[in-house]
Image (tube, rainbow, N blue to C red):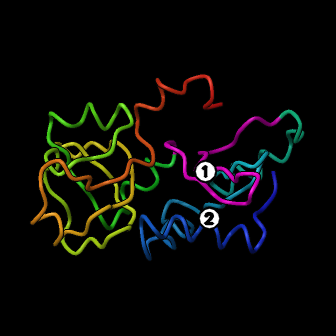
Amino acid sequence: MRPLTEEETKVVLGKLSKYIGDNVKLLVDRPDGSYVFRLHKNRVFYVKEQIMRWATNVARKQMLSLGTCIGKFTHGGKFHLVITALDILAPHAKHKVWLKANSEQQFLYGHNVLKGGLGRITENTPTYQGVLVYSMNDTPLGFGVAAKSTQDCRHIDPGTTVVFNQADIGQYLRSEDQLS
């Protein structure tokens, strides 16, 4: 496990800021302790600094994971957030989308969110902004990218895509063998 390089840090924080904006600084400087990002086998982990120091006693080859995996780097150098980052993103999200009960299941099957299934959306959400997707009782279901802005959502048909699905909690079941 090693610290992120400056370039890797820019890429990771850039991706996180797409979903939580300026609240990225709240991830590192928290009142309950200091947290860090670490890279291990192309995966980026978010871990409390004290626990990371204790983990230095474990050999790198024997280390499987530490903290919460928030994403992974592809061979092309791009960074993809994974569903395990949902618990970290949810408390700090700036733009949110709530789904009606009848469209939650479709979203959890990996489909995009249609206007007909949209319960509500935060004001001033721009197009192609990262959004967190919630059920109507405020349970985080996943995250995606807004296909339409808040203003556009008021004037489109019910069959138009509003949010592109990036990750959802249904992935735990669909991709069970690939999550390790």
Percent position (x, y) of residue 128?
Answer: 38, 67
Q: Residue at x 84, y 48 (%)?
A: 56
Q: Which residue is mark 1?
A: 71
Q: Residue sitting at 10 percent across and 65 percent down?
A: 154
Label 1, secondary structure: give it.
strand
> Badge 1: how crowded within 10 Å, few (<14), some, or many (20+)?
many
Determine the residue positioned at 68% across, 57% down.
49
Q: Position of residue 137 (x, y in %)?
A: 17, 42
151 displayed left or right of 83: left
Q: Amino acid at mark 1?
A: Gly
Q: Are marks 1 and 2 in contact (CB under 8 Å)?
A: yes
In percent of width and height, residue 44 lies at 67, 52
Secondary structure of residue under mark 2: helix
Check the image and report above or below for 83 versus 27: above
Image position, residue 66 (x, y; %): 69, 42
Is 8 on the left or on the right of 142, as rendered?
right
Label located before the other in sequence (1 or 2) = 2
Q: Residue at x 80, y 37 (%)?
A: 63
Which span of residues is magenta-colored?
63-84
Residue indicated by mark 2: 12
Q: Amino acid at mark 2?
A: Val
